[in-house]
Amino acid sequence: MLMLEHDAKEILAGKGVPVPLGVLAESTDAPLPDFPPPFVVKAQVPFGGRGKAGGIRSCGTRAALPALLGEMIGMALKGHPVQACRIEQAVAGAQEFYLSLSVHAPTASVAVLLSPEGGVEIEGEGSAALRSGRSRLGADAIAAEVARLAEDLPETVRSAVTAAGKALGGLFVELDALLLEINPLFVRPDGTWLAGDAKLILDDNALPRQPELAALLRARANAYADTAFKLAQGFDFVVLDPDGEIGLVTTGAGLSMKLIDELIGLGARPFNFCDIRTGQMRGDPARLILVLQAMAAAPHIRSILVNIFAGITDLAEFADLLVKALLAVPEIKVPVVVRLVGNGEGEAAAILAGSGLPLRLESDLDAAVALAVAESRKGARDAS
Amino acid sequence: MLRDVLGGRTPRVLVQGATGRAAQLHLRLMRRCGTEIVGGVSLTRKTPDVDGVPVFTGCAEAVLETRADTSVIMVPALSVLPAIAEAIDAGIRLVVSVTEGMPVQDAMRAWHIVRDAGADWIGPSTPGMAIPGRLKLGFLPDAALAPGPIGVMSKSGTLSYEVCRRLVRRGIGQSGWIGVGGDVVKGLRFADLVPTFHHHGGTRAVLVIGEIGGTEEEELAEALRIHRFDKPVFVVLAGSSAPEGVTMGHAGALIHGGRGTLASKQEALSAAGAKVFTRMEDAVEAIAEAIGGGGMASGQSSEETSRSVRPAGR
């Protein structure tokens, strides 16, 4: 997952990377920094291009900070509400570079990009000044590639960029990173360097062997809700549209994503993405209960669509768990459309039909989708 | 090795992690599909055999005793890299690793180990591959499998199950089905399979199940052009509605900084002559129309065959 800049910098600083002094402000009355102005106030949002969108502001005095924070916290950047800002000491009189390390999937290597023209305008490709190379995965190999790309730069700058490459290359491997981009990478006239911004994407799959990073995620669960949920619960559940009308209880990432595409294509409003992983439920309805509770708490759910294509999972067992979960969440009063395919589908249908619950069974997915959409529209009419 | 297997070679298969709960089940199911499983590997060797198949404590011994050339790896995520290294070191030529959650940097290391040995790797995070009627390496569901003329390559398990099941119900089966998985770094990628299906006589058309994120579909488009691929290619893409920066289950299915978008993939694949669909049923209709009747290989039930000659519209 993409780390917010503040967390990325805390992680890097903890490993010895020089970063500008900074504090996180989650509200307008947050404690102000104890370092002197001028400041830069940076919205903490999980995407790039925030500078152009007005998410990075300068601030000359400590007294002006609360008002600026009041303006920025809660504002929407690209539709995403700003929950916190990093107040940072402004860096002056330094040259700006761009350095990026990322996974190049087709060759399973590390793509290294270096440009002597850092700053907001650079967005990777395009720029004529951009130097690019590839390296095998390994601290020394990455450092050597950065040094090679910096070879013809003036001596002071070259040694600073090379030092940055050595530090960041080592951390790329150590942190199980997928992307580590420093833009700008400040190089001062005395040859010291500083990570002006940090974009760090960590590998969720590696969290089991990165206990410090996993602990950080748990501590900051409010800022990384989707990943923290998966880490705690073992499956994916993402609310896409808080005002959505159709709740999805589905398994399989690709088919769940496609269902959302097709629902939106029909003009419907799916509430969530879900990959519940029936194979891991092992006789426990807890996951289903959790998902149904989230739907019960959502304001506009009008129907629920359950779609399970089971290669291996015994659908009779799943049907039994679904009935238990629905009984455990009686707040669910909307129509539930169920489509089950695979192992034991006949027995599953019998269990659902005999449950006494008002379930609508469908064997064809398009028909099930049409029914869930029709029910959601009927529900909308009844409510209006 | 994969190309030989599609061409008729019968692989001799090991299952690494064979004594695990799920692995024992899958070992039996794979055998039922005709797969020649010659051994299991388990470091703890909790049982001396699974379903009558001998269990060894290491790949080297297993290969020596059984002349295995293929391995299906069913070990926990953090153990997949050492398992692949051990298999390749023992001389295995084709590995299929089904486990979800392999760290990306482990996959990068495994990629080089496999590539340096000139072997093939399908995975990670895949239901595996199948040649219906002959072979199953992994756990593709029987409800979606039938022999036929379509070569399938897929990033998504469940989405490929759904589309292939709809095709099978119309009497159109598969010549070979390879799940490449939805991870960022993987063994065989879509583009790597182009020459394989190009040279495979049993494949009359190719179905690609792709999704947003990464560049694999764009690489595929390039490979179709380079190989002058002349069989029809049908593509279903998932994720047309995915917001930027939100991961939906598959680590690789992430739009980031305007890259990996559906539009980019649609454009590249269409330009390479592929037919791209966002609705599953539209793709199924188009394939049914192009392949028509006779999409199921001989040996199918008369019921299935009669379905294959139904008109395309429902």
Image (spheres, coloured by chain):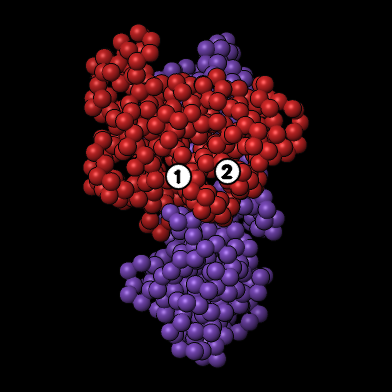
Chain colours: A purple, B red
Q: Could you tell me the amino acid type at mark 2?
A: Gly
In front of the other: B128 or A207:
B128
Q: Is A292 positioned to the left or the right of A259 in the image?
A: right
What's the chain of the residue with tag 2?
B
- Residue B246: percent from left, percent from top: 47, 49
Residue that numbered label 1 is attached to:
B188
Residue that numbered label 2 is attached to:
B91
- Residue A282: percent from left, percent from top: 66, 28
**Is disc 1 placed on a helix, strand or loop?**
loop
**Residue for point 55% across, 16% down:** A344
Asked if residue B197 shows in the view, the reply is yes
Relative height, residue A199 to residue A219 (above, below):
below
**In whole angstroms, how far apart are the C-alphas of marks 2 and 1?**
18 Å
Most extreme residue toward the bottom, as rendered?
Answer: A190
Q: Quadrant of the N terminus of chain A?
A: bottom right
**Residue for point 39% across, 45% down:** B192
**Is disc 2 placed on a helix, strand or loop?**
loop
